[in-house]
Image: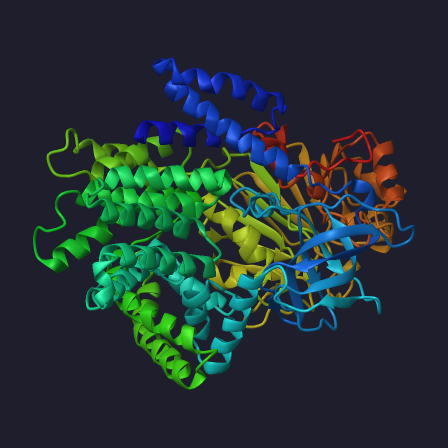
Amino acid sequence: MGQGSVAFLSGILLLQWLPELPTSWWIAAGVVLVPLSLVLPLLRLPACCFAGFLWALMHAHLILSGEISREVEGRDLLAEGAIVAVPEQHSGMVRFEFAAERLWRADSGEPVPVPGRLRLSWHRDAPELIAGERWRLRLRLKRPHGFANPGGFDYEGRLYRQRIRATGYVRADPANRRLASAPGSAPLQYLRQRLGKGIAAALPERELAGVVTALAIGDYQRITREQWDVLRRTGTTHLVAISGLHVSMVAALVFLAVSRTWSRSTLVRRVPAPWIAAAAALAGAAGYAALAGFSVPTQRAMVMVAAAMWAVLGSRAKAPWRMFFLALWGVLFLDPLAVMDAGFWLSFGAVAIILLGMGNRLGRGDWWWRWGRLHLLITVGLGPPLLALFQQLPLGSPIANFIAVPWVSLVVPIVLAGATLILPLPALGEPLLRLAEWLLAVLWPLLDAIADVPWLQWSRPAPGGWILAAALFGAALAVAPRGFPARWAALVLLLPAMTWQAPTPAPGAVWLTVLDVGQGLAAVVRTRHHVLIYDTGPRFGPDFDAGSAVILPWLRQHGVRDLDMLLISHGDNDHAGGAPALLSELRIARLVASAGTAVPGYAADPCRRDMSWRWDGIDFRILLPEAGAAGRRNDDSCVLRIAAGDTVILLPGDIEARAERKLIARGEDLRAHLLVAPHHGSRTSSSAAFLDAVAPREVVFATGYRNRWGFPHPDVLARYESTGARIWNTAAHGALEIRVSPSGEIASTSSWRELRQRYWHERVVERSGHR
């Protein structure tokens, strides 16, 4: 079973690495070839691998067949359908999942093929939305599209994993109306929403009410960014996710309670207590997993609980590794896309480490030694995957979990009892929920203190290739039982990942990365020993900005902890919105900003003409603004010229035609090999005279996909095309990296979407034949 499940997993993984899907004929071939393994034993492992590949391929074809056409993107559509998940509240906006039953054009009434689930936002005057309600809505939709950056979150992958095939927003229209009330087609989600409201009402103004809600129903909306940061830094995020630990604990408690109760009943003569207890435990675990939305850890726990209950009914024990691989089979069969979730790897990885490291030794030694050893093994074993996924390893995790796991295990039954009673008997449910929140509040200062210890947060660049493979094997050796052959090799195998440094430019070279931050600009300039960030992208809301979502993950993946300079061209949100996140997380030697650009709590040197410096043989010079500029207009943007030998890079911010004329009239040498188009390609910029003066060979437009301003403007794009320059757009190509060699020549220009294309990623059709 073990070899077969690993082969099945390998086939699923193989598909996830493909940039394009194979044709559906592969599924037909599998119908013929896989059964051959039943008569030819040598083909069984290859057949399991092929079966996994086909199983994932079939799901992929079914999901991707629900794409909306490009012709209906951005057009008004009318839809009828149901809200199928608990709506999320985000500072005046409601986001919800909508299963459309009918979809048609608002202007012509022409029907539109219904995609999979829709993720919608209702921005203004949104009514209270209840899971299970049916609505008629006026919408605008677009195909799934997210930022594409090294180290960044794959939003398109997440939408694909959740079977969401379009996103959009509700248009203001008197015709928007509720067609049917809840619970409708989503009774479980309706119940989750009601429980969430009940818990919120029972814990008004309580600091950790969001954590209680997460433990009860798997709803994380009310957990603050600061609280998530504490959990991440202490390696305890798994405690607020309804995980296998919680599900297994509920199953065990239900089994013991029902078994003892049934044993005292006269009915035990007809039905043995273990049978009834096993059925009740399975039902209790399933109910708790359902409240969590059947996440990957709860799926694994459910299969393991089912196997354990089957063993009870059969009066024989199942080998732990057999149950492990049975759970792996079950999760992959139910959802082959689970492999795209980091929780899949961390969940199964943690269980494998426990089985490998603590096998046959759970009863040896003092309890505190066994418990502490368990968490130490998990930290060591999960170290390589955590570095690969997040570039961070919380070294305080063994200490935090040593105390937090049993403490939260005490809290969870109280939370569940309170949540069960909060709707029918609020007078009993409220005190229990308040007690649970108080117990969490007692624990929280300890987690906070561990999170604040700097040396317990170990960060390294993401290892890859053979370095990661060696580290994974080394971690397995490190947690293996004493006496396992060649355990000494663990340190040798782990050492490359622990000491590996991301590549940096050679002396005299410069690397420019224009990040994909949507409608905005953020660029990283690196020389041999220095790093400069030019602009920080937009802030999208109180809990989401380009600084934390895009720039910091990129810096972590490349091993950058300190900045020599943060240069903010001007104060518009799409250029300065991410600055607070960077300033709070990084050591920044110098902050430079256009006059009038406010960065609360930080003093910035004013950006002015003729500021210049030299790093590692690369010359930097500010061309604008003039001294005394107000700094409150696009034309007062800081214009940065970077010269590496004969190659020049020009970053002009949001200057418009007036500032362009000023630069030309002053006789500045504007010729540049690479130009980041001023003002994102607005028609008020990139005048013909300016393009003649710059004569760029490559042009980068920093724009958002289907942005509301239509940047780059068609006239401006045509103007650039007429120059013969090679054209790039972050909306189409994702992050762009331009490397200038020490000889002063552009050695390479690469697009992240092209480098890391996967079959679920959006392929943007560009208007021109240029790149």
How has the structure been colored for display? rainbow
Could one spot residue 475 in this view of the protein?
A: no
Measured as percent of width and height from the top left, residue 268 is found at 22, 61
Left or right, 411 with respect to 194, comes to left
Q: Residue at x 58, y 21 (%)?
A: 28
Q: Residue at x 47, y 23 (%)?
A: 50
**In the rendered view of the protein, which quadrant contains the N terminus?**
top left
Measured as percent of width and height from the top left, residue 487 is found at 17, 33
771 and 40: which is toward the camera: 40
Q: Is residue 90 above or below residue 430?
A: above
Could one spot residue 69 in this view of the protein?
A: yes
Measured as percent of width and height from the top left, residue 325 is found at 32, 37
Q: Is residue 743 above or below residue 398?
A: above
Snapshot quadrant of residue 284 = bottom left
Snapshot quadrant of residue 670 = top right
Left or right, 285 with respect to 620, comes to left
Q: Residue at x 57, y 32 (%)?
A: 58
735 and 139: which is toward the camera: 139
572 and 395: which is toward the camera: 395
Q: Residue at x 61, y 68 (%)?
A: 90
Q: Is residue 516 above or below residue 209?
A: above
Q: Is residue 87 above or below residue 4?
A: below
**In the rendered view of the protein, which quadrant contains the C terminus?**
top right
Q: Residue furthest right?
A: 108
Measured as percent of width and height from the top left, residue 405 is found at 28, 62
43 and 632: which is toward the camera: 43
- How many callouts does the rendering have? 0
